[in-house]
Amino acid sequence: MTEMINPTNTYTVPSVSISTARTGASSKSNVLGMRAMQELAYAKRGEQYLLIKSPPASGKSRALMFIALDKLNNQGLQQAIIVVPERSIGSSFADEALSQYGFYWDWQVAPQWNLCNAPGVDDIKVAKSKVKAVGEFLASADKTLVCTHATFRFAVEELGIAAFDNRLIAIDEFHHVSSNPGNVLGSQLGAFIERDKVHLVAMTGSYFRGDSEAVLAPTDEAKFETVTYTYYEQLNGYQWLKSLDIGYFFYTGAYVDAVAKVLDPALKTIVHIPNVNARESLKDKEREVNEIMHGLGEWKGVDPATGFHLVQTSHGRTLKVADLVDDSDTARRSRVLSALKDPAQKNNRDHVDIIIALGMAKEGFDWIWCEHALTIGYRSSLTEIVQIIGRATRDAEGKERSRFTNLIAEPTADQAAVAEAVNDMLKAISASLLMEQVLAPRYEFTPKSNGPLGGFDYGEDGYKDGGRNIGVNADTGQIHVEINGLTTPQSPEATRICKEDLNEVVTSFLQDKVALERGLFDQENTLPEELTQLRMGKIVRERYPDLSDTDQEAIRQHAIAAMNITQQAKLLLAQADANGGGSGDSTLQGSTALLDGVRKFVNVRDLDIDLIDRINPFDAAYAVLAKAMDEKSLRQVQASIAAKKVSIPEDEARELAKRALLFKNERGRLPDINAADPFEQLLAQGVAALARYRAQAKAAQGVSGNG
């Protein structure tokens, strides 16, 4: 579990390692030339509104080509408009001779209708200038057009919603859109859905639609059929890449010094330095790039053909370093970009060794040889982190391992802005935990003794009624786990959420600052149930207010089970590694290190939902913190968080009172404030606190009435 990044063994980066079976399934094509994800999406090609959630490099662009061609040739749609966030991504929709791989038609875009290839830069003026071309396309007999989000927005504003009737509108990198009234494209999509005269296909490499803001209003999103292809399914189906490590490393002082300690020059690496306004930045991006290169070795000049810096290491090897940060010399920058995108060099592993970037090299940037994505500071967008990790998860011959490392500034006693540093650190840890959930296999939870599920392998002895059953689907990597006392979702929507959208619920939980602070840094004063039942319960109710209490509770239980089982599996594996025991082996096809940990956790426990609720979801993360952070800094942060805890707020008191009622129904008595069980005490305190709030409200009402 703990991975040595630097060959000098100076530092270790705690990480979770996802290992896969390398079945080759995700790169194999069917008779129509479709890979696994594309086949999944194409099966739903008849849907009017389709949302495709799939990782970077899984083939979304080509999936859209297949779907669009069917809509144009079989479903009676007049034209297809492909909308991408920036011009560079437009190249993903260049002509493709799909028929030579078995499909019925070829994908073709006439040169004048790929507006991303027109001269100019990505700015508002250029985007507006192409609106006329969109109008001309709509009036033509041609079938396909590619343009940017900006051009499409302006075209809709000028030409009106009705001008696009009976057409397919496909939005690539859909996470750039949001339902915020200030987001024009989001509002326009809502208007298209209300008119109901177009087909929409939305594609995203993110599992966090819009991060903190929803991409679509819930009523609009409910109209979309979803195709979800998980990161695990993709990695499990690769031919070469078999493991991905995710870790974070705390540093003090200047980040450029820490980069030198965790950057292994033997690995093909993309380094994303912080924005100049970020707290981690040294406020001089050119100096930062120079210091990173200096840490690698001695600068030997610039390759005139590519613009790459040449840096000689202490071992005598010359590294080729692409600098995408320095924009002072536009000719050199253009040369570097052209060299990186040179199709003749795509399969040349030795073309470049290290790329240093600021805002670029995230989306639509395909360097299959990248083995290490190293990012400094927290990223405010989880989507951005998915995209950065996606740079390192391409499959390439001989590339067996990839990693993502997040460098995090450690709060220190002499910092003026300790609170700000803690805030940034919490966000970075939250992102790391979320990526562990995204990369883990999906769980299929059922109540105990509900019976085996089709497609799952329960090992040599098979399924046992009432046993500690774990089934594995070798094709998808899904894990079936039985849990005693688990609430079953009642409605189709709640069932769908429990099967497909648990990551969305866990995302909300891990972005809840109170849960993070108390779960990580105030474990002495925080009961696990305050997090698993109260905080998660509140989040589920707020996300899904129209679902029944039973459905809300089912979603809460499933989300906490997915998170706690993953984290406990990780913790057990870390302990095994620390003791020199390793993660054990397995005979099941498609087994992973994480699966071994799940087995260990389930096999030593009679798994029930009450047990899961009594586990702090941040136990594993705290174990990493305790090892990785300076003890003095850790104690300082713990003290500052503990000092913030206040009396029970009203919404929490209301939730505790609800849980107290459940307690009474189960036990035939109210919770006792003097009970030995700390959570029973808390329930009683919640009932008392709610009574006080109600009395205060009544008194205030009386004063108001008398006044």
Image: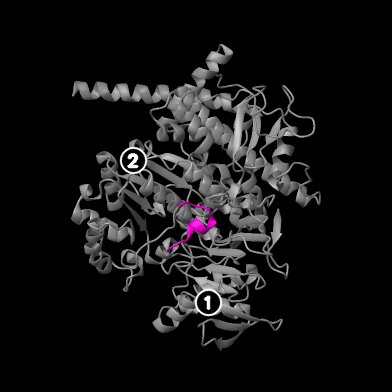
The residue nearer to you, when weighing 210 against 576, is 210
**Looking at the image, residue 317 lies above or below residue 364:** below
Percent x, y for residue 139? 22, 56
Q: Give the percent coordinates (x, y) of residue 15.
A: 65, 55
Residue 98 part of the magenta segment: yes
Within 10 Å of disc 2 (Cα), the crowding (few <14, some 14-19, many 20+) is some
SS of the residue under disc 1:
strand
Which segment is the magenta one?
A: 95-104
User: Which x, y percent locates residue 175?
Assistant: 41, 51
Instruction: Check whether the beta carbons of the residues at disc 2 and disc 1 lie within 8 A of each other.
Output: no
Residue 542 against residue 422 in the figure, above or below: above
Image coordinates for residue 303, horizontal then vertical, percent: 54, 86
Residue 217 magenta: no
Please name the amino acid that badge 2 sits on.
Answer: Ala
Q: Is residue 329 visible?
A: no
Q: Residue 456's image quarter? A: top right
Query: For the residue marked with disc 1, what is the amino acid?
Result: Ala
